[in-house]
Amino acid sequence: MPIRMTFRLSLAMAVGALVPTVFAATPTFWQVSTLAEFLKGDTIEHVAVDSDGRLMLGPRNDVVYAGTTPAIWTLVDDGQGAFLAGTGNDGQVLRITLDGQAAVAFDASEAQVHAVAAGPGQAFLAGTAPDGKLYRVAPDGASSVLHDPQDKYIWAVVVAPDGTAYVGTGEKAAVYRVSPAGQAAVLYRPKAANVTALALDPQGNLLVGTESPGQVVRVDSQGRPFVLLDSPFREIHSLRIDARGHVYAVALDGAEDEAKAAPAPASKAPPATPVPVVSTQITVTSVAGVGVDAGVATPSPSADQAGGKPKGAVYRIAPDGLWDTVWQSNDDLPYDAFPQGDGSLLIGTGAKGKIFQVMEGSARATLVARASAQQVTRFARVAGGDVCYAVSNPGKVFRLSSSVAARGEYQSDVRDAGTVATWGAVRWHGRTPPGTAIEISTRSGNTKRPDDNWSDWSVAYADAAGSQIASPKARYLQWRAVLTGKGVTPVLTSVTAAYLPRNARPTVEAITVHPPGTVFYKPYPTGEQDLAGFDSGTSDGYQPGRLGAAASSSTPPALGRRTYEKGLQAFAWKATDEGDDRLLFDVFYRHEGDATWRPLRRGLWDPLFTWDTTSVPDGTYTIKVVASDAPSNAPGAALVGELESVAFEIDNTSPIIERGAATPSGDRTVVRFVVRDGHSAVQRVEYSLDANRWRLVYPVDGIADSREEAFEVVLEGVASAIVRASDSLGNIATEVVGR
């Protein structure tokens, strides 16, 4: 039988029913103050976030190239003031100038160009996949196949000063040495699935990065290998060497869905084709070279170093072979590392397009930039100290300037209040050195994403200590911070917005009616063993150790040892409240056929009650539990929810045994009697000659299923017996029958 659930306001809440919109009394505070919280922002433009969660102006960031290609795998300086970009899935090499002009320098028949290297005489080499070929492209654009190995993938190419090319392949990992004339020979075959990265150290040795396993191997001119690093990660994705001869190895071990758009090989199948992402705006944040007022604290260690299995790491290998971990992350996959002239290191990651900076001698990473693309795939130096970097999904190229922007804008993520809310005050903390400013404004709406149906941005609020939000009541809220300054940046450390969501009605989800007489002791008695729920309602809900004392979502509490007490009836229920309000319970009962609910117990904190049913007549009853969130709401704002139990029987009256005729027959006596019960069925009848050994008696009709049953017993050698009868609820009667 389905359980009916009804919701109605009690008399005490009648005033609240007259209010068209009921809001909770306890406000909710939405605070943004950490790196993780700031990174959820909807728009981040020309502002930076450091590891302490400080928002500030960042360097200028200009889109150099924005085409239609879904991915740019590599970016190489062509030595002529432009960049060569290897792309997918169109298999082209683009020549991109710093003023944004792009032209197709080479169009391969294969889908991917993962490797590009500048060659002698202004020519360049391009390695393709999945039908791996090495092409030589002349300055006039004429191309020819320089090397056509049997391997499916060419992942890396590096060119020595004498024009010799070294080519890393997969799925059968090999390193080929290819002369400028195209003569090729295998220099080294690692015990790996793919050769994924190549570099030449200052001594002319070849450094090889592999996949499955992720190792860095030094190979001399004779092809003799020496493992420099045996990492715990699946792949060495990139190798970089700084001016002092330190080798930076980028290792990753990402999931398939995050690594699918990167040029990461697999031993069984090629990398998945990247899925183009439609983007109307690319925004970048940066803290590189930003002047912060000296009174601001230095950054703290990155949250990326928290527990969990790292997705990737960057290792630094010294010229003497010693290595250490420069950076690792549990959240981001590294794809490239780029040494800076000041000893710092830029690290490009996915799948959220972040760039981190690690300063020399420090294990602390700072977020330098973030683009609205999935992967930062490759860095390249620009004359004058700027840095260009390529991104994929979608494929674009950016220029990260050394100059600080004069204006930056940050739009928070959208806060969902769950229902229509009344907005309170917004306040913020930060520093505004002379000549700088922070402006905070808000907007609201009832659609998940801001659109034309939202309110306009409010005027900038004047009081950072607390300004009333002017946006209209709605379900969603968003705030915007505009930072301005010249040479010195303001610093925003936190923004807090208060709101009152509309009060949600509590719900009583289920009521358990335990068998009659089945009750429980409290699990943690103090002194005498008390029955659970038998003295409920005396607590104000705040005493330590009380069951459900501070519960906002009430479930049947833990119970102690079970026992049997005739006449007692135990109930337990589960109630929830979407607003996490504390709940108070009233229990009512009703006899079958009555129209009026009578109070049984009010003001219960625990979702449990034990009823002494001897206080009411026998019959069929139903209880109703009413949950109120009044303890967490102002008078007139509270709401109630209620639920009725299934019907249950109360029967505390013993059966009646009516003596019938006793008919002698020789030394036997046939005794007849009737057992009647006023409410429940006769369940069991026994007789005994000595009040010790009992024998079961069946009704004349053969089945005990009615409130009145006739019985017949044949006694041998005696003329009377003791009869004991019990009903289905455990009530017992005894009587002597016979002569």
Image: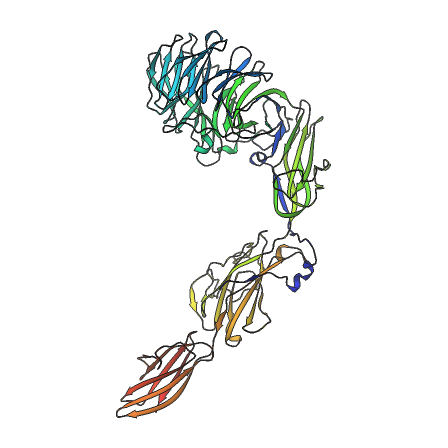
Specify whether residue 401 is in view: yes
Specify whether residue 542 is in view: no
As rendered, which of 504 and 465 lies closer to the eye? 504
* Image location of residue 555, percent across then percent down: 51, 57
Q: Quadrant of residue 477?
A: top right
Instruction: Check the picture and name the quadrant holding the C terminus.
Output: bottom left
Q: Quadrant of residue 444?
A: top right
Q: In screen coordinates, is 432 left or right of 272?
A: right
* Image location of residue 570, percent across then percent down: 48, 67
* Image location of residue 683, percent across then percent down: 39, 76
As rendered, which of 400 and 124 lies closer to the eye? 124
x 43%, y 26%: residue: 264
Residue 135, relative to residue 329: is it above or below? above
x 58%, y 29%: residue: 298
As rendered, which of 698 and 511 lies closer to the eye? 698
Please state the total of marks drawn on the protein image: 0
* Image location of residue 655, percent across then percent down: 43, 80
As rendered, which of 19 and 95 lies closer to the eye? 95
Q: In screen coordinates, is 31 left or right of 150?
A: right
| View extreme (front): residue | 109
